[in-house]
Structure formats: structure tokens, C-alpha cells
Image: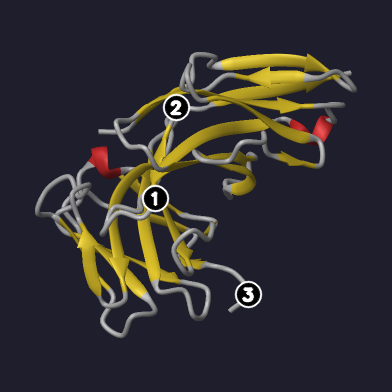
Amino acid sequence: GAGVSQTPSNKVTEKGKYVELRCDPISGHTALYWYRQSLGQGPEFLIYFQGTGAADDSGLPNDRFFAVRPEGSVSTLKIQRTERGDSAVYLCASSGPAGSGYTFGSGTRLTVV
Amino acid sequence: AQKITQTQPGMFVQEKEAVTLDCTYDTSDQSYGLFWYKQPSSGEMIFLIYQGSYDEQNATEGRYSLNFQKARKSANLVISASQLGDSAMYFCAMRELYTGTASKLTFGTGTRLQVTL
């Protein structure tokens, strides 16, 4: 597609529930990144995919967070047993060859009540 | 580890004036890239300008210029002729270049710019 698409744009869930956030990168972009942005903060790195594999998942806060990219295109960020502290905007970005820039999606605002 | 510091949580500037947003960084790498992004209230991250660590000239993109002082590890953003539409959060970010897997961006905490009449 023309840009990075993230769905849903907003998600409200109850504490303890499971959620999935989807990212559809720019066609042909091999690298895909997930970031989490809490209110008043800069985005924090979560995980980065090069193709289908997670090249760096050092930013995932704990084992409740998991992400996949099975066909090297669309990625899903999965959060189990959500907690109120997981409330944030989750941003996805993709990039092409090394040295090229990043294109960000509009984010998914997750609210855990 | 890389670190980006933005010491100005908020800035005001009058329309048509220039403003400088500060950014300092810390890295032990020789090759790195510096970015500035704008984030309006709608939430999307809009790329503004990029400076590579080996670029000898300061980057410019229209009304945006990057004042790159490598020895001081600073990469300040200068916006000339401010417009009301420039009101937004501004983030400085850095990434390593040409390393095996670490291409992630590290962001600062941001500066909220408010342009006034």
C-alpha cells in the first residue's frame, strides 16, 4: 500500500484480556518495527523484523508480549493478560534497504480498563 | 547504548520567527544517523530531516535545517519562519548504521512547540 496501515486505530480492553494489533507495512519494505509510546514520552523500541524473523526483540517488556510476521509482510503484536500499564499508543514503522528512512503508521491507541 | 537527550519539554515561538530545538546524543559508534520527526496531535510521526555522521554539510530541507556539531554530539533542529501549523511535538532520534541487526531508532523524550500569533 501507499503507507503503513495499523488496525485498529483504537482498542479498549478489560484488564486480563488478550489483544492483537495489526501492522501492514509498505509493500516491498523488508524491515518492520514496533514501538510503544506512553503519554508524554518518546516512542520506545519493542521489536524489529527483517523479513519473517525477529532480528531484535530486546525491547519487549516481558513474556506477555509477542509479535509475528509469518510471511514477511503483515505483522501482529500480541499482548496476553493485559494490564493497565500496557495502555499506550503502539506505533509500527517499516523501512526499505539499509540507509533508507522509516515510514510510521498512525498507531493503535490501546486502553486497558 | 545509544541515548538521546532533549532538555526542552516545551517551547514557544512567535509566528514568522525562527526557533531552535535542542538535541544531544551519546553513542560510542562511529557511524550513525540522526533524525528529526514531527508528531502533531493526530499522532502520526512525520519525517523532517536526516543527518549522517559522516556528512560534512549540515542537512537542510526547506524551512528545516539541522545544526550538527559532531564534537559536541549535538544535532539541533532549526525551524525558520515558524507557522501556526508547526505546533506539534518534535522528536530527535538516532540509529546505528551498517551494523548487523541493530537498525532500530532510539528517540528522545520530545519537545512540544507552540507557535503563537
Q: Is residue A80 above or below residue B21?
A: below
Q: Which residue is mark 2?
A: B109
The reply to whether dot 3 and dot 2 touch (C-beta < 8 Å) is no
Residue designated by label 3: A2
Check disc 1: other Cα within 10 Å, few if <14, some if 14-19, many if 20+.
some
Tell me the element at label 1.
loop
Q: Residue at x 17, y 45 (%)?
A: A61
Q: Is residue A67 visible?
A: no
**Residue denoted by label 1:** B97
Q: Residues at marks 1 and 3, common chain? A: no
Looking at the image, residue A44 sits to the left or right of residue B82; the answer is: left
Q: Is residue B39 left or right of residue B62?
A: left
- Secondary structure of residue under mark 2: loop
Chain of residue at mark 2: B
What residue lies at 33% left-to-right and 80% top-to-bottom? Answer: A72
What percent of the width, then of the height, locates residue B50?
59, 44
- Tell me if A36 is positioned left or right of A108 in this view: left
- Between tags 1 and 2, which lies in front? 1
Q: Position of residue B14 (x, y in %)?
A: 84, 16
Of the numbered discs 1 and 2, the one sitting upstream in the chain is 1
Image x and y of residue A28, in percent: 49, 80
